[in-house]
Amino acid sequence: MSTIMIAQDGQPRCQWCSTAPEFISYHDEEWGFPVDDDVRLFEKLCLESFQSGLSWRTILAKRENFRAAFHHFDFNTVAKFTDQDVERLLQNKGIVRHRGKIEAVINNAKRARELVQQEGSLAAYIWRYEPDPEQLATPQTVSTSPESTALSKDLKKRGWKFVGPTTVYAFMQAMGLVNDHAVECIMRAQVASARTQFKRPG
């Protein structure tokens, strides 16, 4: 099965772009570009956990609703959510109304605050798990990696929820810790360049 598709502009892109029109802009502007912003990293971990068992298209379509519901994923604010907030969110038709996942976001916000206090920033902690590019599998052939397994295990040890190795690997793909664009994809070189210029937090 081919890992690329030819878009309307005649350029090759990752095959998964063909499954929804809104994926093109997400693919070209976000997916794989390195991120060092704590709030964006926290948001993506939360959205990946919401995606578990669902499609990314479902989550992407609701992303602005999620942002509004969770105060743009400011974990310092979300950490203060109460049981009343959980019940309020369960009535919000604009998001995925899954009690366990909603409660996990609140729990993980508390854990994120703790992690920042201990490690300086989420970014500094997460980027320690960046894989060696020379050791990576062929793009889009695996759904976990030793690094995603290690990060998942450590997050769980710290009390985070809904952060299994597959969820964490999808997060690493999206946030630029891994350049998993197909070899022929027009964006692979751009992401590689962005990763070269990116200053790793520490």
Image (cartoon, rainbow, N blue to C red):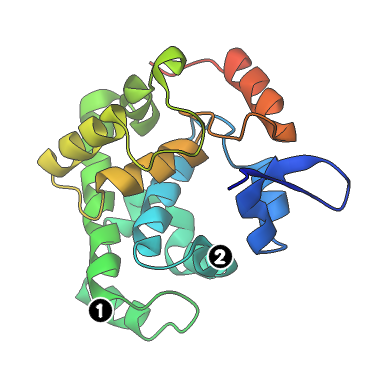
**Mark 1 crowd level (few <14, some 14–19, many ≥20, 10 Å Cα):** few
Res. 32 image quadrant: top right
Q: Nearer the viewer, residue 97 or 181?
A: 181
Question: Foreground: 71 or 31?
Answer: 31
Q: Distance between the residues labelled 2 and 1?
A: 29 Å
Q: What residue sits right under mark 2 in the picture?
A: 57
Q: Specify whether residue 40 is in view.
A: yes
Note whether 115 is above or below 93 in the view shown. Answer: above
Tell me the tag on residue 84.
1
Earlier residue among tags 2 and 1: 2
Task: Name the residue type under label 2.
Answer: Arg
Q: In this view, does 46 lie to the left or right of 178?
A: left
Q: Where is residue 87 in the image (x, y as percent from the top left)?
A: 28, 82
Rendered location of residue 59, percent (x, y): 50, 65
Compared with 127, 73 (above or below) is below
Q: Mark 2 or mark 1: which is in front?
A: 2
Outermost residue, front side: 1
Q: Callout 1: helix, strand or loop?
A: helix
Q: Is residue 38 visible?
A: no
Residue 185 falls left or right of residue 156: right
Image point 59% across, 41% down: which residue? 31
Q: Where is residue 120 in the image (x, y as percent from the top left)?
A: 30, 25
Which of the image's four quarters has the C terminus?
Answer: top left
Other-residue count near label 2 (Cα within 10 Å), few / some / many at <14 / 14–19 / ≥20 = some
Residue at the image point whose x is 59% and y is 35% from the top: 181
Image quadrant of residue 88?
Answer: bottom left
Q: Who's the residue at 63% across and 45% down the image?
A: 2
Q: Nearer the viewer, residue 69 or 135?
A: 135
Residue 31, numbered circle? none
